[in-house]
Amino acid sequence: MAISSKLKKIIDDDKGYLFQNYGDRLPVCFTKGEGAYLFDQNNRKYIDFFSGIAVCNLGYNNKHFRKAIHDQIDKLIHSSNWFYNKEQIGAAKIISELTFPGHTLFLNSGTEANEAAIKLARKYGLAMSKNRFEIISFSNSFHGRTLGSMTATAQEKIHSGFGPLPAGFKYLPYNDIKRFKNEVKKNKNIAAVMIELIQGEGGIIVAEASFVKEVFDICNTKNIITIVDEVQTGVGRTGKPFAFHHYGILPDIITLAKGLGGGIPVGAIHAKKYLSETLDRGSHGSTFGGNHLAAAAALTVLKEIKKKSFQKNVLRASDYIFNELKILKQSLPIIKEIRGMGLHIGIELNRPGMNMVRKALSRGLIINCTAEKVIRIMPPLNIPSKDVRSGMEILKEIFIEEARIS
């Protein structure tokens, strides 16, 4: 993409004033959004198939969301968790209705939600036995960037340079029930198992139903806490309110964020009531977590995804995208595998995918590449059919062009 003088000034200022931990950003600065479209510094529009990493589930400038946020800003943005908060209560009530009876603690992000889940699991495990503090997670997982959630993330590249890491984490192969059974049999110190049912950053790797069922059966028998990380898969992304609904299981804890706030930073941990009592007064907290603005955002998003018409749109868009991709795969060896659920879709390539991301951006389509070779498609959940078709036309053209490159 050609760099205009306006964009060059933005890039220079970015390098001059901001940490460069994200590396070179893609050459665009978005300034506004409408529906499933984003607009850049030159008012050029882009179809969004990424949603800010599965965050903007209601798209941009959604009338219900906009009104709720404006109304809340006009009333009250923040008080403190020392006081009651009606917006928190309303959002927590819907989370319980959509998942299981329990208690919710609001935080600021998915990382913080997973950190809270780790603390809760450890505190509960240690109350049962002085050595019961270990957490099992799975290869290629991603659970966050704080020291605890980073250590739960079973990827060496995430750990590199930050040691020594906290003790008490075990990593097992994903979808390998034999290894899991062996670990549980020999290890009496396991407090909890932490799992993504679809590994997002790991490459949209879907957990096998039989594996998940056996893991949960064993954990229920052994009184091992089950934590499902729904940070990326939750809040309607997979075609059901939460990914665990596809598996016929009932976790002890779920963590959520990303799409929960529609772009307003908010995370949450939801746990069965017997567990929530473990985090007693002073054991965990957050200054900003679930403040009036964040909780109002979450409440509005949750009300929207409860609507049957909303979930029907997710499934309709998902079916169209998967069908188009399957047709492409038949004739294009560049596509190795298509994975995912709902509008949480990964296309594994036989080569690195960043060139496709840049090419798509130059043509007005926002996609993402994760795990080096997996194109990730995660549009707003309410994306209209016409925009799905338009985005897929651009994507198909790029796939066909890339396939011609030896």
Image (cartoon, rainbow, N blue to C red):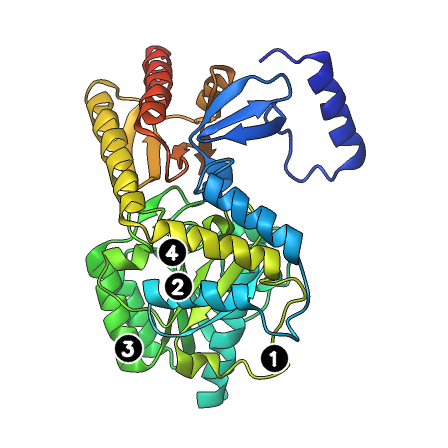
N-term mark: 1 or 3: 3
Q: Residues within 10 Å of mark 2 (few under 14, many from 20)?
A: some
Q: Is residue 240 above or below residue 371?
A: below
At 33% from the left and 81% from the top, the residue drawn is: 223
Instruction: From the image, state whether disc 1 or disc 3 is nearer to you.
Output: 1
Asked if the residues shown at circle 4 and circle 3 are in contact, with their CB atoms under 8 angstroms apart, the answer is: no
Residue 361 picture location, percent across and down: 50, 20
Res. 281 image quadrant: bottom right
Viewer-proximal residue among 239 and 334:
239
Q: Amino acid at mark 2?
A: Ile
Location of mark 2 (residue): 94
Res 220 label: 3
Q: Whole-Å distance between the Cαs marked 3 and 2?
A: 26 Å
Res. 179 image quadrant: bottom left
Res 283 label: 1
Q: Whole-Å distance between the Cαs marked 1 and 3?
A: 26 Å
Element at label 3: helix
Residue 378 picture location, percent across and down: 40, 37
Viewer-proximal residue among 373 and 385:
385
Q: Whole-Å distance between the Cαs marked 1 and 2?
A: 25 Å
At 24% from the left and 60% from the top, the residue drawn is: 211
At 36% from the left and 72% from the top, the residue drawn is: 252
At 54% from the left and 73% from the top, the residue drawn is: 119
Element at label 2: helix
N-term mark: 4 or 2: 2
* Whether residue 162 can be seen here: no
Q: Amino acid at mark 1?
A: Ser
Location of mark 4 (residue): 196
N-term mark: 3 or 2: 2
Q: Residues within 10 Å of mark 3 (few under 14, many from 20)?
A: some
Q: In this rendering, would 284 be left or right of 61?
A: right
Instruction: From the image, state whether disc 4 or disc 2 is nearer to you.
Output: 2
